[in-house]
Every structure is written in structure tokens, then in C-alpha cells.
Amino acid sequence: MGIVVVATGGTISMRPDPVTGGLVPALSGSDLVELLRWPEAPPLELDEFAHVPSWDMHGELAFRLALRVREQAQRPGVTGIVVTHGTDTMEESAWLIDRLLDSDTPVVLVGAQRANSVPDSDGPRNLRNGILVAAAPAARGRGALVCFDGEIHAAREVRKVHTSALRAFGSPGYGPIGSVDGATVVFRRQPERRPPLPVPAQLVVEVDLIRGYAGWDGRLIRASAASGARAIVLEATGIGNGNLAVLAAVQDVIADSIPVVLCSRCGEGAVAASYARGGGFDLAAAGVILAGDLAGPKARVLLQLALGAGLDAAAAIAAEA
């Protein structure tokens, strides 16, 4: 059976709309594989899951994708899985898949920065590299991975770092865990992974992510709570700081039993309870949950899963921080 290619759309499958000229998903997974012109490829099975841009891969659809990948990974004879996916939210889907994956089967997400219609599209090379990684015995047990521009990144660490460059992804503070050079797959380190989370009945979508800025106040935090948020993630400034207005809003929503998680808007480093006057020290004293160096979007995904499974938010974040 070999490798299962789960196609979801994204730029790797896009061509200009003949009427508007805007890029839209146009190619199926089988089309992408055919374009490889790779007779020596390992056996491939196609799973045409979706046909959407990655900004539409969220909520129930993203949850169903994670469950589909989990199910495929449990099938006898499947040695690896490649997911073709748009780049905008690839890091979130990789993390969602990783936290539910309960097998050692490699799962590799790939995509493209340049549409399939341009002569120098990076999609075919990234797809080929992803298949090589998924087929590599050394990839087993490393969870969900992102393979892009010859680099291999772990789900917890990877972030999209450039809007348009071919090297679209990085792992700030960590670096890639491996690379693909020609037909050779090399791993340099083993990413640390926690046991998978229990599969929730559904993904809790009402988790908001609020980014801090100079002079921010409590309006968005209170509006989030008033509109039905089940939890709130703050991407605070620096090492995890707000101000007195933010602190007052946080105290109010925590008093209403809404968990608040603290991340940093910085690309590297962890949050800490250091500063008073509405900084991380005061926020932690108010009951905010510190997320270490976990990126805001991934803290949000983790809360969506934890709350859906009836887990304690603080314990779920602490296990990954």
C-alpha cells in the first residue's frame, strides 16, 4: 500500500480562474502526483479530502482532516502519510494532527508558495520531498512534520515566516529537525512530543486570539468574553506583558471562569512572570496560564482540543509549555 496522499487544496493545487484571473484550487491530488513524473516513486494511494484554500481549513473541516489522517495512520500497510495543504494555516493543521496522532506513522504536510500554473512552481519538489520523508524509516515516531524547501520541521515548533519566499517556514529558536538533499533524508534531532490528547466529540471553535500592541486596553478582551468565548489567548508584548487596563479586563473574565492563556507576540523566547504594573507578574497572579514559548495560534488549537475533551485548560497548556 505504501504512502497515502491526502489532498486538501492550497496553492500547490491552484491555477488562475479563467474568468477573474484570481488563483483558485484547480488540481486534484491525482493531478499533482501525475505532474511529478516520478516512475520510481513508492506506491501511492490518493485520498481526495478537500479542495479549499488553507484559510478555509479550520473548525469542523480541520478537525475532520485530523481525524482522517489519524484513521489512515492506523491502517495496516500504510507506511506514511503526506498531506497537501495551503501554507497560511499549515502550522495549525500540523499541530492539530500531531496532538491527536496516536501512532508512529509519519505524517508530512507539504504545500507551495507558487501556484501550479507558473513554470517555477515549488509544489512538485516539495511534494516529492514530502513523499521521501514519509517513506523514510527514521521519520517514524516524530509526529506530524512540515517539509518545505528542503527543510523538515516539527509540528510544535514550525511557523510560517515569510509571505512569499520559497523558504516559507522556520522553527524560530529551534531550527529544522532535518533536511532533504536529493533523494537523501537526514534527521538531526528528535522533537520532544507529549502523549496524544483524547479525541474530543468536537473542536471548540469559540477560543479567541488577541494580539497585544502599544496602548492596548481591555475592550477586545471584554468583547471576546461577552460574545461567548470559551477561552482567550493573549499574544502579549515582550516576555508576556499587558498593562493595568489589560490586567483589569483579565481579572474580570477570569472571575467569570473563562481561562486566559499568555503567549508572546515575539518570534522566539518564552513568557515569564517578571514585570508588575500589568506585566506578566501581575497577569500570572490574576490566574493567567503561561504558555512558555508556545505560539499563540498553537495555544489556541491546544485549548480547542482540551476544552472539547473536557480537560483542564491549565494542565493541558502546562504539559506543552
Image (cartoon, rainbow, N blue to C red):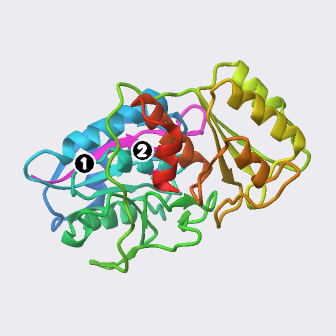
Where residue 27 appears, x then y in whole percent?
A: 37, 42
Which residue in the protein does label 2 denote?
A: 96
Horizontal placement of 296 versus 265: left or right?
A: left
Q: Is residue 227 above or below residue 194?
A: above
Give the residue displayed 21% in from the left and 39% down from the top: 71
Where is residue 48, by image quadrant? top left
Where is residue 151, by image quadrant? bottom left
Label 1 element class? loop
Give the residue displayed 74% in from the left and 61% down from the top: 239
Q: Earlier in the sequence, mark 2 or mark 1?
A: 2
The verdict on residue 11 being magenta is yes
The one nearer the camera, 319 or 109, is: 319
In the rendered structure, which amino acid carries the disc numbered 2? Leu
The verdict on residue 143 being magenta is no
- The disc label shown at residue 75, or none: none
Q: Is residue 197 above or below residue 161?
A: above
Where is residue 182, by image quadrant? bottom left
Give the magenta part as a residue range.
1-26
Can residue 129 be seen?
yes
Where residue 294 appears, x then y in whole percent?
A: 56, 56
The one nearer the camera, 131 or 194, is: 194
* Residue extending farthest top: 227
Where residue 213 appears, x then y in whole percent?
A: 84, 49
Can residue 54 be seen?
no
The one nearer the camera, 288 or 175, is: 288
Label 2 element class? helix
- The disc label shown at residue 102, or none: 1
Horizontal placement of 294 versus 271: left or right?
A: left
Q: Is residue 139 above or below residue 8?
A: below
